[in-house]
Image (cartoon, grey):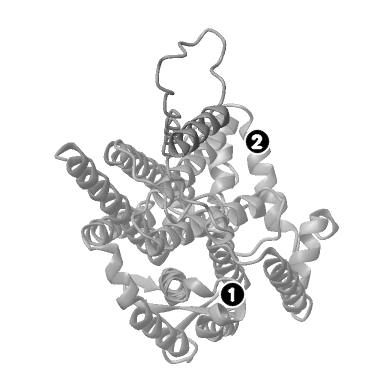
């Protein structure tokens, strides 16, 4: 009996401890188990976006090192390749016609034929076209290995040309080897060789871009040696071109701006020092500021060039009808050929040539931006910078905006070494464009077959 009472008591205690049913629920039903927590939905996987480091943002100032190859790269590179070749062909054609016109008087006075200089320019054009085809078919990556031996050969020639028995002196400068019907100017080849060497050194030390001295130490002594040899000729214009091209390549590579600013200030200071330490260079510089102060001396060439440009008007006096080429404008078919072009073809013709150069530079920039690797980008960028700087220096000198430096107008002025080397450099750009085109086509095929 007692055990029954204890069992009833324990049952009543358990019933009292059980929670009361909620209103509206069935008291006879078993208490439902606690519902399992609802599984959280997995967040959508966000597309992985590769973060751009500061170094990659600075690479070539506008192009990322990890740039994705678009499907249309092959077709785009082909268009820019054709644009580059078409522009180069037009500039060479204009140059050949203008050399014939501007040199006819001088050529007749020297040889009795008005066509001798033009025939020589045509021969240089054929040789340059062959060099363009050869470098276009050659893989551009090979210049990473061949650039330094090429530069050593150029330095040796720059040393030999200074010897009176080997070099030819013209206009007070020993710049050429006289090989009978042709003259060879080693400094023109040194421009292209330096671009190749600088691009190769920057690529090998790409991870040290924040330590400029680590990049500059391998090639800066070589650049200084080349500039010194060129200045001993003397040739300040080519020295400025070489320095400006190397500076542009360092800018494109993304070196810190504070170092580039310091280098620019130092370069301008050195240029001014070289100008004012030589009497003829100082006279040229001062005549650029005020050519009418000595119109029959240091300011004569610039004044006659301005007369030629002003005489052309809007449409020009007619092809071959220039009056200033009759021994008024010195170097009418070389450094000052743009003045004769402006006189005969007028403002329209002059702007047309400037537009062609702008198109050439644009096509080169697009090819550099689409190069398959960093070496190709720096090599193409250096070549384009060289073309652009040289054209600006020449046009600035003819129009009186810059001092006269004796730099020819690329593809247009008479000159065998300049024409052959610049056409060979165009071939290197074509090789880079073809490599980017093949890479883009290969990746598109790979994506299509996945």
- Residue with the mark numbered 1: 235
Q: Is residue 316 among the parts visible in the rendering?
A: no
Q: Residue at x 69, y 71 (%)?
A: 259
Q: Is residue 69 left or right of residue 274?
A: left
Q: Upstream in the sequence, badge 1 or badge 2?
A: 1
Q: Position of residue 200 (x, y in %)?
A: 41, 73
Q: Residue at x 25, y 57 (%)?
A: 136
- Splitting the image into 4 quarters, where does residue 297 fall? bottom right
| 3D distance between C-alphas at marks 1 and 2 | 31 Å
- Which quadrant, please, contains the N terminus? top left
Q: Residue furthest top?
A: 24
Q: Position of residue 245 (x, y in %)?
A: 55, 65
- Splitting the image into 4 quarters, where does residue 275 fall? bottom right
Q: Nearer the viewer, residue 92 or 36?
A: 36
Q: Nearer the viewer, residue 372 or 241?
A: 372
Tag shown at residue 423 = none
Q: Nearer the viewer, residue 227 or 292?
A: 227
Q: Is residue 125 among the parts visible in the rendering?
A: yes
| Labels 1, 2: front one | 1
Q: Mark 2 and mark 1 in contact (Cβ < 8 Å)?
A: no
Q: How many marks?
A: 2
Say what secondary structure mark 1 lies in. loop
Q: Position of residue 415 (x, y in %)?
A: 42, 62
Say what secondary structure mark 2 lies in. helix
Mark 2 Cα shell of 10 Å, populated few (<14), some (14-19), many (≥20) = many
Q: Is residue 164 above or below residue 227?
A: below
Q: Position of residue 174 (x, y in %)?
A: 52, 81
Q: Residue at x 77, y 78 (%)?
A: 273
- Residue with the mark numbered 2: 311
- Which quadrant, please, contains the C terminus? top left
């Amino acid at each position: 009996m007692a055990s029954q009472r204890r069992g009833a008591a324990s049952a009543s205690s358990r019933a009292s401890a059980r929670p009361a049913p909620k209103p509206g629920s069935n008291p006879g039903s078993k208490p439902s188990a606690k519902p399992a927590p609802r599984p959280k939905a997995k967040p959508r996987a966000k597309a992985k976006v590769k973060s751009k480091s500061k170094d990659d943002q600075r690479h070539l100032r506008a192009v990322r090192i990890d740039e994705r190859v678009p499907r249309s790269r092959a077709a785009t590179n082909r268009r820019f390749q054709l644009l580059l070749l078409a522009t180069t062909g037009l500039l060479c054609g204009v140059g050949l016609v203008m050399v014939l016109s501007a040199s006819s008087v001088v050529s007749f006075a020297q040889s009795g034929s008005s066509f001798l200089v033009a025939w020589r320019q045509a021969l240089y054009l054929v040789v340059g076209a062959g060099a363009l085809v050869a470098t276009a078919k050659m893989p551009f990556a090979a210049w990473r290995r061949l650039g330094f031996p090429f530069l050593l050969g150029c330095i040796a020639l720059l040393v030999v040309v200074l010897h009176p028995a080997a070099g030819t002196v013209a206009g007070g400068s020993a710049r050429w080897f006289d090989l009978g019907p042709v003259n060879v100017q080693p400094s023109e080849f040194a421009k292209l060789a330096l671009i190749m060497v600088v691009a190769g050194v920057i690529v090998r030390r790409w991870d040290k871009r924040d330590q400029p001295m680590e990049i500059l130490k391998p090639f800066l002594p070589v650049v200084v040696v080349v500039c010194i040899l060129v200045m001993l000729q003397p040739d300040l214009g080519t020295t400025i071109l070489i320095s400006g091209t190397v500076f542009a390549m360092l800018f494109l590579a993304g070196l810190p701006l504070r170092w580039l600013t310091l280098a620019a200030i130092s370069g301008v200071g050195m240029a001014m020092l070289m100008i004012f330490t030589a009497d003829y260079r100082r006279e040229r510089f001062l005549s650029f500021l005020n050519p009418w102060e000595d119109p029959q001396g240091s300011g004569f060439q610039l004044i006659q060039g301005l007369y030629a440009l002003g005489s052309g008007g809007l449409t020009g006096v007619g092809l071959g009808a220039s009056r200033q080429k009759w021994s008024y404008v010195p170097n009418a078919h070389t450094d000052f050929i743009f003045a004769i072009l402006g006189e005969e073809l007028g403002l329209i013709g002059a702007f047309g040539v400037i537009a062609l150069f702008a198109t050439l530079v644009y096509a080169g920039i697009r090819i550099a931006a689409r190069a398959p690797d960093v070496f190709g980008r720096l090599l193409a960028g250096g070549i384009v910078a060289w073309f652009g700087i040289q054209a600006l220096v020449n046009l600035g000198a003819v129009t009186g905006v810059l001092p006269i430096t004796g730099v020819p107008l690329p593809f247009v002025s008479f000159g065998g070494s300049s024409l052959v080397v610049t056409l060979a450099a165009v071939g290197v750009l074509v090789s880079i464009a073809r490599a980017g085109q093949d890479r883009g086509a290969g990746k598109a095929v790979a994506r299509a077959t996945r």
